[in-house]
Amino acid sequence: MKPINVLILAAGLGTRMRSDRAKVLHRLGSRPLIAHALRTAARLDPASIVVVVGHQAEDVMEASREALDGEMSARLRFVHQAEQKGTGHAVKCAADELSSTPGLLVVCYGDTPLVRAETLQKLIDEHERGGHSATLLTIRLDNPPAYGRIIRDEEGRFRRIIEDRDCTPEQRAITEINPGFYCFDIPTLLPALDRLSPQNAQGEYYLTDVPEHLLSAGLGVGTVEHDDPHELEGINNRVELAAMWKRLRQETLRRLMLDGVTIVDPDSTYIDDGVEIGRDSIIHPQVVIEGRSRIGSGCEIGSWSHLTDADIGDECRLLNGCVITGSRLAGKNTVGPYAHLRMNTTLEPEAVVGNFVEVKKSTLGRDTKAMHLSYLGDATIGERVNIGAATVTCNYDGVRKNPTIIEDDVRIGSDTMLVAPVRVGRGATTGAGAVVIRDVPPKSLAVGVPARVIRQGE
Ligand code: UD1
Ligand code: CA
């Protein structure tokens, strides 16, 4: 087995996206297009992954590094293609980087996110089995759009690829096309790149001309016909992006349902590809679950809830309309309806957050309840605490965000203003409407505006 290397072309702007952002940075499901291509490449366990960058190179490089874990990220390299003179030119830009690299080069485009590693492996296997110097995937489409056509001789042997815009009407009628996945032997690829010329309809150096140069040099070119066209589709515009995103969602929902999750209305449920959900959880209509979210088993997620990077433990109930971002529910929690948890909020087991409550960067201890109309920010709240309706942690003094600490077994009266930084000691109580500007000692009762301690703890 020769060592495998992967080259991903991602220098183009993607004019038909009509965007100021490079095409490969557009999101499909939980991650940008380039990340899909990279994660698939990583599954081949390649010796190196080289990405050709051009438009918004810095952002594409950053998105690429983020897509891979540390070990694979160390095998990632970038080459710059300052001016996009075609896919053949893009590969040539990597020639210096590759000249000392032994083995095989799998080339694919950064805008074909759904291809599976198994399919690329099949390409590699045929390449090695046949001893070819290049091997390409092909696919048959009834009315192929602007793809390169596969030209074969009378015996059915591969001869060359002709780009759609360079085709005669007869050639354009050919239904076998080039979806853009190649395997090359690096030592024979590099000299063939030098023979490319831009004498074609687009005035570009076409990678697709390489196979015929290899054939004319007496080398072998193989093909592998694939049968799932959706898997190999590229994104050219936002209509195609939306259609692919929808298919990806459908696959995700199918996977989750087969794994034991009830999705009441798959047509109105939007769950990102990476999301994990445990058995016997129920997802009601019109729920969105995005990013690196994880939901345990036996949970129920109410309609109109929107979860992003949420970590939800087992047996949690989210009533309608919860927005949870970057936060954790440890288990057996009830939240909502219409609650907002964000920025590293943690609910310890059995903590309850109720109607119209916002919780930011705070922890609620076991069995603590904030049932109605409150704002809790930068607060650390102990166990068995009751937060009365309309309590506010006044955490912002105009300059800084200040912490509030509420110890175990505290009862905060309705409409208490906790002017931070402030601490309410274990077992203390605040009266309704108290404005707490000083620490409240344990087990005492503080009331009024500003709050005064009227009963000390025993
Ligand atoms: C290419 C193929 C075509 C195939 C189709 C499949 C060529 C000449 N044609 O056409 O046979 O049917 O893909 O989708 O290869 N890129 C660069 N630098 C460049 C040019 C392109 O990095 O100078 C990147 C783009 O960012 C893009 C990819 O290569 O991700 C494909 O380029 P694109 O111009 O879209 O090629 P197609 O015309 O689709
Ligand atoms: Ca394309």
Image (cartoon, helix red, strand yellow):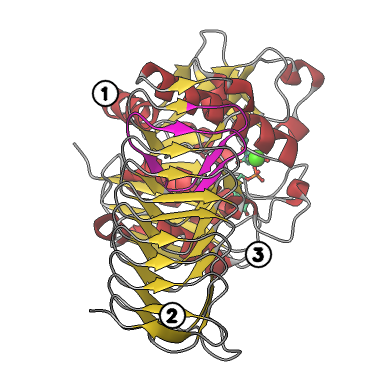
Horizontal and vertical percent for residue 281?
39, 27
Classify mark 2: helix, strand or loop.
strand
Of 18 and 173, nearer the camera is 18
Of 76 and 114, nearer the camera is 114
Q: Is the Cβ of the residue at disc 1 closer than 8 Å to that at disc 2?
A: no
Instruction: Name the disc covering residue 446, or none.
Output: 2
Tell me the residue that label 1 is attached to: 129
What is the C-alpha distance between the residues marked 1 and 3?
37 Å
Which range is magenta? 283-308
Amino acid type, label 2:
Ala
Horizontal and vertical percent for residue 235?
64, 38
Amino acid type, label 1:
Arg
Where 383 sits versus 406, above or below? Answer: above
Q: Is residue 311 left or right of residue 354?
A: left
Tell me the residue that label 3 is attached to: 83
Q: Please tell me in which quadrant of the rendered image residue 72 appears.
A: bottom left
